Amino acid sequence: MPNVIILIPARLTSTRLPGKPLADLNGMPMIVHVLRRAESAQLGDVVVATDSEAVAAAVEKARGRAVMTRSDHVSGSDRIYEALEAIDPEHRVDIVVNVQGDLPTINPSDISAALKPLDDAQVDIATLAAVITDADERTNPNVVKVSGQQIGPARLRAKNFTRKNATGTGPHYHHIGLYAYRRAALERFVKLPPSANEQREKLEQLRALDAGMRIDVMIVKSVPIGVDTPEDLEKARRLLGG
């Protein structure tokens, strides 16, 4: 079995929901909900990578592990790479799973599912998606759509990610921003310059595709809530029983 680590990037500043990682979700900070779900996947060590001492303190109070990173990272990928190099300078870790810190309802089994494509040595990065069942999502630019070649009953080889409207008969897929990287792929990715497609769509995964890296997608049953606004937070509270 490869040596796997789950890294959860968490920065305190957020324009739409200030202090987001520490937002109370039924008596527990949101970042701790994500931590618990990542731990439940039972893939390996789980570490929160943050630029906030308050976030680190909340994680450690919950008996989790946190590592401090720089505050000037432009993406979660950059933050987890810094954390990885600090945690594992000996390069023992083979696979790095990036679980966003604002997914408090993520299913632990879906985190595990993201590793399956990496059984194929040709795959650099694996991620998740779910079939779009709400027609409004097809035209919502905040819903990232992924398309590609079907290579198994629940697996695609990604060809494109876009915020544009989904057209045609489908099925259409809602991309879930969770990634499993081979370590070498993560290192290569963070050292690449942003691509033109990435800058146009504001989607960093396009940088990998434009560089010829292979991304495969596992299709799962549902999309976790990404908490970006107070309304999202209230919806997560309801779903989590509060």
Image (tube, rainbow, N blue to C red):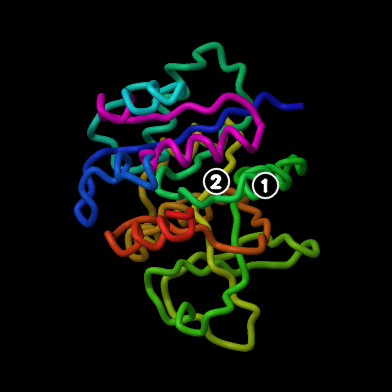
- Residue 137, compared with residue 17, is above or below; it is below
Which element is circle 1 on? helix
Left or right side of 131 for 237 = left
Q: Give the mark nearer the N terminus: 2 vs 1.
A: 1
Q: Residue at x 37, y 44 (%)?
A: 193
Rendering coords of residue 28 (x, y %): 38, 39
Label ID, residue 179: 2
Q: Which residues are magenta?
A: 28-56
- Residue 135, compared with residue 97, is above or below; it is below
Q: Residue at x 51, y 81 (%)?
A: 166
Q: Amino acid at mark 2?
A: Tyr
Q: Amino acid at mark 1?
A: Ser
Q: Residue at x 60, y 55 (%)?
A: 128
Rendering coords of residue 135 (x, y %): 51, 84
Residue lying at the far top of the rendered structure: 90
Q: Residues within 10 Å of mark 2 (few under 14, many from 20)?
A: many
Q: State which quarter of the image contains the C terminus.
A: bottom left
Looking at the picture, tell me which residue is in the foreground, 187 or 63.
63
Looking at the picture, tell me which residue is in the foreground, 120 or 236.
236
Q: Nearer the viewer, mark 2 or mark 1?
A: 1
Residue on which the image places disc 1: 109
Alpha-carbon distance for marks 2 and 1?
14 Å
Residue 14 is covered by the magenta coloring = no
Q: State which quarter of the image contains the N terminus.
A: top right
